[in-house]
Amino acid sequence: MLIAGPTASGKSALALKIAELHGGVIVNADAIQVYENWRILTARPSREDELRADHQLYGHIPYDGEYSVGHWLRDVALMLSGSKRPIIVGGTGLYFTALTEGLADIPSTPPSVRQLANKRVAIEGHLGLLAELDPYTKARIDQKNPMRVQRAWEVLNATGRTLADWQNNTPTPLLPLGNCFPILFDVEKDWLNQRINHRFNHMLSRGALEEARANFKIWSPHYLSSKAIGAPELIAHLRGILTLEETREKATIATRQFAKRQRTWFRSKMREWHRYNPSDQSITD
């Protein structure tokens, strides 16, 4: 079973309920929840939830580790061949697309290319890299997502081939969509934004600020784990740059913007998935 949806939509709660009622192992499909250093801020399942059902691929990568969709597919392959039924849940649309449609075998990015990309993004933002991509690649990626733009630029400069060219030679998918039951949380914007507006306060009450303090000395904007929404704002607060109220406002806005990008991806890439509306508990084709 596959369960995809935007942040704060309640998909993890549904996965846990299914696992408790019918058995199975809950497998993470969120690119940031794989990191060990942000549990509260990434809304990883709590330790109590982990005792209620088997959870895999959560918090298993160190804070400074590299982890790509290719790494995730290799890890998920082990889950698919296990004895427990996998319930794959998350909000990273690229993971689900790669799982059900296949992923091109692109070589890893050399450190020199990654360092150059990081330097350019720090100076000029991701739009400079975007301008150097071919139109076919631009049409396939989320141009507002700095990570996706940088990845496409790195592929071009490391291999001499565009990301679109690599994707045109994609192998057979690990789990074709017809071989599973895919559920997409198709939620209304106002309903989701209302939940998001309360989300950061809830995280603060659970210890998100203390979690940020624990990460303060190891913080670097170049780590993939630092892409956790709200992390830059909390670090800025600890440095005295933002008040707590400003931190709360900026983190909430960033979450809404991220959810908007997720919903856009899902609705364009996952048209064949079963729609689930949590407000009326219905699943439709």
Image (cartoon, helix red, strand yellow):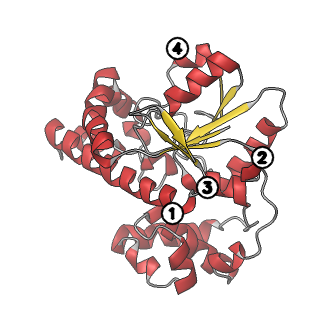
- In the figure, residue 244 lies in which quadrant? top left
- The label number, if any, that marks residue 272 in the structure image: 3
Q: CA distance from mark 3 to mark 2?
A: 13 Å
* Contact flag, marks 2 and 4 (Cβ < 8 Å): no
Q: Amino acid at mark 2?
A: Asn
Q: Between 33 and 123, which is closer to the camera in this rendering?
A: 33
The residue carrying mark 2 is 179
Q: CA distance from mark 2 to mark 1?
A: 21 Å
* Contact flag, marks 4 and 3 (Cβ < 8 Å): no
Q: Amino acid at mark 4?
A: Glu
Q: Amino acid at mark 3?
A: Glu
Residue visible at 35% across and 34% down?
Answer: 212
x and y percentages locating residue 84 in the rendered image: 78, 26
Q: CA distance from mark 4 to mark 1?
A: 35 Å
Q: Between 98 and 74, which is closer to the camera in this rendering?
A: 98
Camera-nearest label, 4 or 3 = 3
Disc 1 residue crowd, few under 14, some 14–19, many 20+, Cα 10 Å: few
Q: Is residue 207 left or right of residue 70?
A: left
Residue visible at 26% across and 32% down?
Answer: 198
The residue carrying mark 4 is 48
Res 134 visible: no
